[in-house]
Image (tube, grey):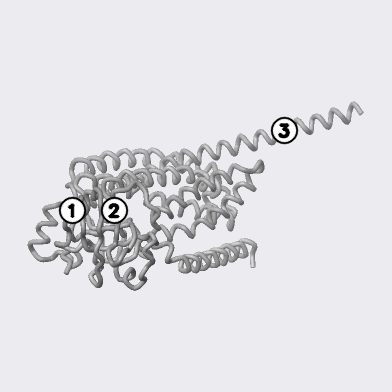
Amino acid sequence: MIHRFANPTRFVRLADVIQPWAAGMTFLFFVTGLYFGLFASPADYQQGETVRIMYIHVPAAWMALFCYTAMAAACGTALIWKHPLADLAARATAPIGACFTLLALVTGSLWGQPMWGTWWVWDARLTSVLILFFLYLGYMALNNAFDDAERGFKASAILALVGFVNVPIIKFSVDWWNTLHQPASVLKAGGPAIHASMLTPLILMALAFKAYYLWVLLIRMRGEINAMKVRALRMRQVQQADMADKVAAGKVG
Amino acid sequence: MKRKHKRLTFVMIGLLLLGSSAALILTAFEDNIVFFYSPTELVDKKPDPAQRLRIGGLVMAGSVEKLAGAVVAFTITDTAKTVTVQYKGILPDLFREGQGVVAEGHLKGGVFQADEVLAKHDENYMPPEVAEALKQSGQWKPKETTQ
């Protein structure tokens, strides 16, 4: 079953069907999410209008964790079951996840200044998210550090799996330790601590970010598949040229 | 055992070992990971006046007073114990009585001399009308009303 979509041709056919839908969903959810977030939702009783940063910051932070989890799962699949597309999926996910993480860090900083009174503190939540960002960068660097693409995939996949320990640490850092960052508002025991009028734009924006990820992931994976084909083609050319040289040399000698 | 099952077992055991070692390390360093101490921890710890530390809790209602020379004094509480804080400087916008706050500085003679005060907000988000309605109907969280 897992190998049913291992065939790149079959994958591209499936991607052709999904991609326009993902693009449409991204557009739809972004427009409605931004409308609700900027116009059709109230200001917060404590934070006032600044609360609207949440509609970018929180979905970006969720995606930072989601992309890393997806990347680690793909890496595990590649290492254990040698699924040929899993490496490409992980490789395609890394830069998207890194961008979401950076977005979460930057918007968090912009939110922290007016609310907390500081751009940055070294509390457990902020520090562990910064480590997540470095893990993404490390994964990408290691992935490209080898001449042999296979070895790069393997080394970086191990790094991604090792770094996965950080994901639960990020999620629960606000519960395990005293942090300046407040505890979870949506995914917590006893239901969300956010009023429905503010939860609506938050969920819409989260869906927009998810659809955007799917859309860009498919584009990037297509690119990776093409790059792989080009690589294989070049290899064959080099081999053929090599062979021809040997034959020619044999005839002359 | 097939090769892929071997690899699966290897990865699973690896992750398990990694997770438990991470848990052990984080537990060992817990004291360094916490961003601030609560008043109870601070009273129990009796830190050296030279040691820089952070204290966090709720600003006790009715405790904020302006002293001479632009110094503000207030009491931080964790509903069990309290610590008096003195601070000279501009307080963040979100600084309010009954709200969370983190102060950084030194504990000298039972009074916490802060040189930085950060506001900490809680996980609740709601429109002002809803907050007002909750307060009027008496359904407001007891944490907010403070002693």
When asked about the image quadrant of residue B100, the answer is bottom left
For mark 3, give the secondary structure: helix
- Residue that mark 3 sits on: A238
* Marks 1/2: CA–CA distance: 22 Å
Chain of the residue where label 1 is placed in the rendered structure: B
For mark 2, give the secondary structure: strand
- Label 1 amino acid? Ala
Up the image or down, B97 lies above or below A138; here it is: below
- Residue that mark 1 sits on: B68
When asked about the image quadrant of residue A145, the answer is top right
Residue A207 badge: none
Q: Who's the residue at 38% across and 42% down the image?
A: A212
Rendering coords of residue A99 (x, y %): 43, 42
Q: Who's the residue at 64% across and 48% down the image?
A: A151
Image mark count: 3
When asked about the image quadrant of residue A169, the answer is bottom left
Up the image or down, B122 lies above or below B82; here it is: above
- Label 3 amino acid? Val
* Marks 2/3: CA–CA distance: 63 Å
Q: Is residue A172 at least partly visible in the picture?
A: no
Residue B118 badge: 2
**Same chain, marks 1 and 2?**
yes
Q: Horizontal placement of A179 versus B63: left or right?
A: right
Disc nearest the viewer among 2 and 3? 2
Rendering coords of residue A134 (x, y %): 49, 48
Nearest the eye: A104 or A69: A104
